[in-house]
Image (tube, grey):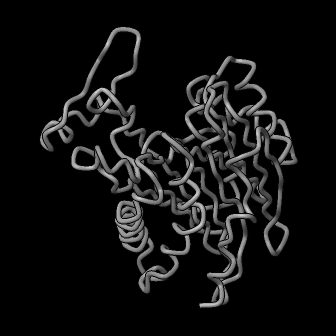
């Protein structure tokens, strides 16, 4: 289909530069988005990628937003940036059953990543994706600890589930893995990975899940802001704090920039990436 050409990773930024920001708006101009990505203090290259785009497809307007937080390299999040939304929209049932289409596409994309491990490497990535259909229906999915928060009349609601090893210890142990709890460190799957679900990570895949949690919300006149961000933001900021900061700015790009700046001020050491969507309300 001709819309697949739109999924060119160079359009979205992320990955290599130490700081990336930008903005855009819907076809009708009634919704706007901004994004900001800042490299953390670790010695490795930037491993966060994002998507922020409005598209016209089959007579529908879609808002596509995502944060991909890589680990052990940026190959897997770069692959997700280019392929995950394309795979979701290739599912024939997307227009009648978005939940099933998203779930199937997440699984197929993970299988494709694993089959290309020789090229993509042994790393992996979290993901949080949001699809806004005709400005009315919002579908949010995630694996890992990147998070989406939706605000209605200024009140923050978390739309995702943080997939942490301690929370999903039973699933990990049933698959033959274990969760380490070393003093001074976060819980880790097999002493390595700090999330219990992820794309890729072939060496740990038998003990990990990659199926997403999926939530749907109706967008109405009370809906004001959507924030997607990597854990570099959420480690130092609550959901409500993020919404309160973003609401101070009419320009969502300025809001996104302020969120990453504030996270740096709060001494977040991880890569920090966020997308802010401002609705007509």
Q: Nearer the viewer, residue 25 or 210?
A: 210
Q: Nearer the viewer, residue 2 or 10?
A: 10
Q: Position of residue 219 (x, y in %)?
A: 62, 61
Q: Position of residue 253 (x, y in %)?
A: 83, 47
Q: Position of residue 23 (x, y in %)?
A: 83, 55
Which residue: 76% across, 48% down? 35
Asked if 247 appears above or below 92 in the picture, the reply is above
Image-based side of 86 in relation to 22, left or right: left
Image-based side of 142 in relation to 262, left or right: left
Which residue: 83% across, 36% down? 248
Which residue: 67% across, 89% down? 59
Q: Nearer the viewer, residue 189 or 61?
A: 189
Quarter of the image with the C terminus in it: bottom right
User: Which quadrant of the figure has residue 61?
Assistant: bottom right
Quarter of the image with the N terminus in it: bottom right
Q: Position of residue 6 (x, y in %)?
A: 69, 77
User: Which quadrant of the figure has residue 214?
Assistant: bottom left
Which residue: 51% across, 57% down? 140
Q: Residue furthest top?
A: 183
Image-based side of 56 in relation to 79, left or right: right
Asked if 174 appears above or below 107 in the picture, the reply is above
User: Which quadrant of the figure has residue 260?
Assistant: top right
Asked if 156 appears above or below 267 in the picture, the reply is below
């Amino acid at each position: 289909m001709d819309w697949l050409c739109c999924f060119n990773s160079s359009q979205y930024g992320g990955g290599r530069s130490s700081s990336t920001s930008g903005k855009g708006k819907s076809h009708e101009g009634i919704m706007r988005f901004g994004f900001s990505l800042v490299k953390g203090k670790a010695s490795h290259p930037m491993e966060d990628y994002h998507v922020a785009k409005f598209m016209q497809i089959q007579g529908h307007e879609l808002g596509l937003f995502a944060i991909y937080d890589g680990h052990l390299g940026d190959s897997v999040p770069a692959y997700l940036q280019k392929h995950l939304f394309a795979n979701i929209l290739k599912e024939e049932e997307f227009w009648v059953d978005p939940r099933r289409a998203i779930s199937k596409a997440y699984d197929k994309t993970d299988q494709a990543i694993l089959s290309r491990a020789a090229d993509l490497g042994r790393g992996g990535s979290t993901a949080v994706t949001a699809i806004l259909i005709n400005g009315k229906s919002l579908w949010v999915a995630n694996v890992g600890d990147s998070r989406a928060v939706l605000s209605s009349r200024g009140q923050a609601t978390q739309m995702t589930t943080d997939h942490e090893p301690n929370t999903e210890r039973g699933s990990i142990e049933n698959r033959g893995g274990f969760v380490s709890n070393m003093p001074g460190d976060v819980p880790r799957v097999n002493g390595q990975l700090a999330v219990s679900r992820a794309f890729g990570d072939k060496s740990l895949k038998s003990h990990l899940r990659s199926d997403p949690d999926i939530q749907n919300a109706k967008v109405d006149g009370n809906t004001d802001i959507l924030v997607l961000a990597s854990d570099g933001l959420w480690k130092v900021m609550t959901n409500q704090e993020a919404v309160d900061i973003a609401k101070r700015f009419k320009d969502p790009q300025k809001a996104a920039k302020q969120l990453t700046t504030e996270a740096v001020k709060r001494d977040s050491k991880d890569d920090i990436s966020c997308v802010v969507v401002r609705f007509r309300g």
